[in-house]
């Protein structure tokens, strides 16, 4: 056998590198680090690259020990019994708001989500969100009643195609949903909802029906809005803002026939029709109410009694266009065509009786005289 050197003797030995925990520089331990003297401390254990770094760390550790960060812990928090977990869905708006303020106040004093959970019963993740910029959903600071016109328009849309429902799994939470085929109407309602719920993100999405038609829809949680509707007299509020209310209700339930020069608003609830007519009367728009049995059809599966408001006078249509109008483009253009067509017909009728009719009479008299 030949005496060949081993592979470990041929390859260069890479020195062992360490990272100083004080200055964060890499260093190679030498024999001085292995002395093991007790007076060298951590430097002898190869944690710091030099006695200077070791002394700097010890000085900073001593300063922290002598000058701790003051944290106030109320004595009653540690001695209190752990509160049961709260069901936030069963709280009213005022109770939830008071709880929100209490959680923020306790966290500012203790800086501990565990202690706040022990006292209030609110889970730690929710305490962290509430104390770092997030606000409770569905019941705290989400409903703005300052924009009255948008609120009246939303109530009118709610009386039409809109609906408020409660999910069977989340008792106490309410959701507003509106679905229509006119994108203009849904976008106008979305704009009104954004002004009323400034904290929410309201998105417009498309739904597919079984008949193959596409509808546009929006959906937003409205627990505070539902509570406000239960406490307020909606008719009194809508009567103070009749233009916005009638516009929202007519965008949902109204239609315009440009050929017949007729604007109608349909609904099966006679009380809603009567109230809408009173709002039109306050605006100076004369109208009439008719009722007839409608159905069955694709939209109405059974026979129902449908009530409608009809506006047929040209002056009333002009007043409606000036004071109310439509957010839906096709209805607005149909109303303009109805007014312009009626004006053209009125002009032709007056021109006939003023110019053409006397000329025809003159010709008839001349023909009579000649024949005699």
Image (tube, helix red, strand yellow):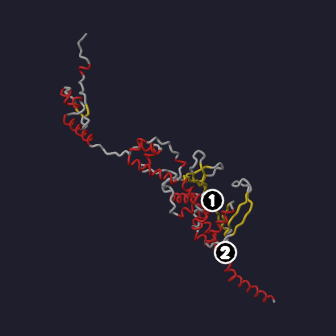
Front-lying residue, 189 or 369: 189
User: In the image, what residue occupies the spot 60% across and 67% down?
Assistant: 239
Q: Which residue is mark 2?
A: 345
Q: Is residue 9 above or below residue 24?
A: above
Furthest-left residue in this view: 32
Q: Is residue 222 above or below residue 255?
A: above
Spot occupied by residue 213 in the image (x, y as percentages of width and height):
63, 52
Q: Which residue is mark 1?
A: 160
Spot occupied by residue 99 in the image (x, y as percentages of width and height):
47, 50
In space, the residues marked 1 and 2 are separated at their CA atoms by 34 Å
Q: Is residue 209 left or right of residue 122?
A: right
Spot occupied by residue 301 in the image (x, y as percentages of width and height):
72, 53
Furthest-top residue in this view: 1
Spot occupied by residue 120 in the image (x, y as percentages of width and height):
46, 45
User: In the image, what residue occupies the spot 21% across and 36% down?
Assistant: 53
**Front disc: 1 or 2:** 1
Image-quadrant location for residue 296: bottom right
Q: Is residue 13 left or right of residue 119?
A: left
Callout 1 secondary element = loop
């Amino acid at each position: 056998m030949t005496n060949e050197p081993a592979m470990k003797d041929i390859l260069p030995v890479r020195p062992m590198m360490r990272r100083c925990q004080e200055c964060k520089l890499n260093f190679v331990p030498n024999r001085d680090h292995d002395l093991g003297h007790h007076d060298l401390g951590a430097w002898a254990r190869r944690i710091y690259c030099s006695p200077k770094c070791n002394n700097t760390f010890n000085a900073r550790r001593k300063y922290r020990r002598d000058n701790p960060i003051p944290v106030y812990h109320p004595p009653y928090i540690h001695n209190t019994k752990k509160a049961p977990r709260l069901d936030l869905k069963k709280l009213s708006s005022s109770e939830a708001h008071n709880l929100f303020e209490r959680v923020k106040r306790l966290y500012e004093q203790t800086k501990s989500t565990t202690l706040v959970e022990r006292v209030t019963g609110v889970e730690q993740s929710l305490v962290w969100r509430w104390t770092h910029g997030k606000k409770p959903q569905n019941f705290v600071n989400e409903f703005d009643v300052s924009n009255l016109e948008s609120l009246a328009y939303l109530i009118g849309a709610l009386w039409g195609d809109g609906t408020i429902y409660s999910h069977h799994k989340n008792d106490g939470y309410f959701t507003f949903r509106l679905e229509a085929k006119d994108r203009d109407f849904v976008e106008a309602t979305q704009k009104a909802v954004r002004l009323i719920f400034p904290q929410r993100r309201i998105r417009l999405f498309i739904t597919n029906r079984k008949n193959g038609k596409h509808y546009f829809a929006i959906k937003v949680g409205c627990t505070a809005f539902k509570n406000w509707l239960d406490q307020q007299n909606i008719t009194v509020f809508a009567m103070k803002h009749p233009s916005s209310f009638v516009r929202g209700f007519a965008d949902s339930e109204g239609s315009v026939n440009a050929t017949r020069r007729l604007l109608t608003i349909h609904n099966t609830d006679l009380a809603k029709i009567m109230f809408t007519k009173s709002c039109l009367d306050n605006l100076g728009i004369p109208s009439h109410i008719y009722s007839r049995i409608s159905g069955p059809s694709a939209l109405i599966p059974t026979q129902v009694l449908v009530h409608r408001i009809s506006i047929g006078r040209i002056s009333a249509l002009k007043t409606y266009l000036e004071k109310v109008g439509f957010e839906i483009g096709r209805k607005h253009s149909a109303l303009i065509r109805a007014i312009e067509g009626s004006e053209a017909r009125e002009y032709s009728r007056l021109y006939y009786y003023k110019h053409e009719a006397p000329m025809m009479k003159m010709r008839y008299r001349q023909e009579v005289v000649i024949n005699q």
